[in-house]
Image (cartoon, rainbow, N blue to C red):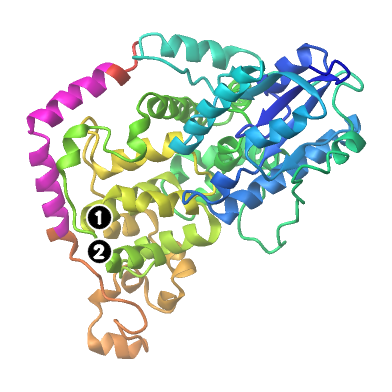
Amino acid sequence: MNTDKERINVVWLKRDLRLEDNEAIYNALKTERRTLLLYTFETMLLEDEHYNERHWNFIRESVRDLNQRLEPYNSQILTVEADIINTVNQLLTKFHISDIYSHQETGILITYNRDKAFKRFCKNNLITWHENINNGVQRGLKDRKEWMQKCNVFFEKEPLKFNPQVGQLLNVSEIKSLHYLFVVPLLATPENSSFQKGGRTTGLRYLNSFFKSRYVNYMTHISKPEEARTGCSRISPYLAWGNLSIREVYHQAYHLKKNAKNKQALEAFMSRLRWQSHFVQKFEMEHTMEKESVNKGFQKLKKDISDTYQKAWKTGQTGFPLIDACMRCLNETGYLNFRMRAMVVSFFTHNLWQPWQNASKHLSQMFLDFEPGIHYPQLQMQAGETGTNMLRIYNPVKNSHEHDPEAKFIKKWVPELKNLPRLFAHEPYLMTEMEQGLYNFQLGKDYPSPIVELESTRKKASDTLWNLRKNRKVKEENARILKKHTLRG
């Protein structure tokens, strides 16, 4: 070992792109050794089918924001395009690295396998890899007997401060000298981007405006596709990529609730923060649900794949205006409120009778807030393949009239229908030929006819899934899942 090399800490940032309330950074700085903050754009993830350029742009914006926040400390994030093992190997030629800090990541299978390989690499190179829990999620649990108590302890702790000593972070010139690494230029995203901008600064702006006034409409707007875009917090991407921590958001909501105008709205919001940790914990304990039904009895369910149906769904050309508006909006902006997400998955898996796995990759690419621990449990729940949840088959026409009564959202995202009266914007297939002529509109040409019949497809899906629930294997799995995941107390 070359004793002339400086001994430093490395903090490997992943889905925790923040300085505040970041336990990995906090613990590294406690050692008083100099510390390097590192983010790696890993080739395996850049090429993975779950991700999209919108995600990488969000991360670039987040790292640029971090660098601005590090300017008072004369430091920045070392940002490279390489896998983590090669990156650390290169750093070992210049530094003595005995400790690496990061959060545990509840990610997809490819990141889990990467972490296993990295753990072996660290052991072989006498490096101690310190992994901190993230958002109350515990690794290695067999059931939920003690999870709630541990999660409560996590949430109740005060958020951690970022307060490095002078010179404790490697300085900008030292980081720039690491030119032998594949350093990534953090190019700016076009200003006309329709996606939420990444970074803690923007995330705090959304959070503060929500707590200042927008939260009062949270309960009444949460299910409405247009109003939810302002009535909901819109901080989900900042939680998914770690610009904000769930704990600090929870603490702010808790303190605001004491004198809030609408305590019930804040209580509902805080409840959903806790449920987020619950779902991520579920995925942590049932990682096979990335590819397989969590209830193994549903693996015998076979569906014929229709490329025509799937393309129509992805591009918003199904002939059902609210479905099409949602899919076009999602493709363009990366965001849908929860109820609309549930509805488009229900339509895909029930009315189109397509496997949820075929929806998974497209939706993960489109959701700017793609969080594996939320994505897979919710997909399977909406597809009706858990065996433990209520079977919900959403009627897109009923939801259209109920949650977009003036058809504002529909006409915004399906402009082919903008000149039609409200009723026909919801259901253009009800128009007679005379009415189509009156409005200079031709069904099947200007806008597609419905690709399926709602009632018959709903009945087929309902009958099939309810009958399958009577299957012995489904019942056994149902009991296993409830025993493993039911929250105690």
Mark 1: few/some/many CA within 10 Å (<14, 14-19, 20+): many
Closer-to-camera residue (443/174): 174
Whole-number angstrom distance, CA of label 1 to CA of label 2: 7 Å
Residue 320 against residue 284 in the figure, above or below: below
Chief secondary structure of the magenta span?
helix
Write down the region rendered in magenta: 457-483
Closer-to-camera residue (410/81): 81
**Membership of 487 in magenta stretch:** no
Relative side of 126 to 229, left or right:
right
> Residue at horizontal 33%, vertical 89%?
438
Relative side of 90 to 452, left or right:
right
**Membership of 478 in magenta stretch:** yes
> Residue at horizontal 64%, vertical 35%?
84
What element does badge 1 sit on? loop
Residue 463 against residue 84 in the figure, above or below: below
Label 1 with label 2: CB-CB less than 8 Å: yes
Quarter of the figure with residue 193: bottom right
* Image x and y of residue 153, in percent: 53, 10
> Residue at horizontal 38%, vertical 54%?
403
Closer-to-camera residue (107/468): 107
Residue 177 against residue 192 in the figure, above or below: above
Q: Residue furthest front?
A: 1
Q: Amino acid at mark 1?
A: Gln
* Image x and y of residue 296, in percent: 21, 33
Residue position for label 2: 306
What element does badge 2 sit on? loop
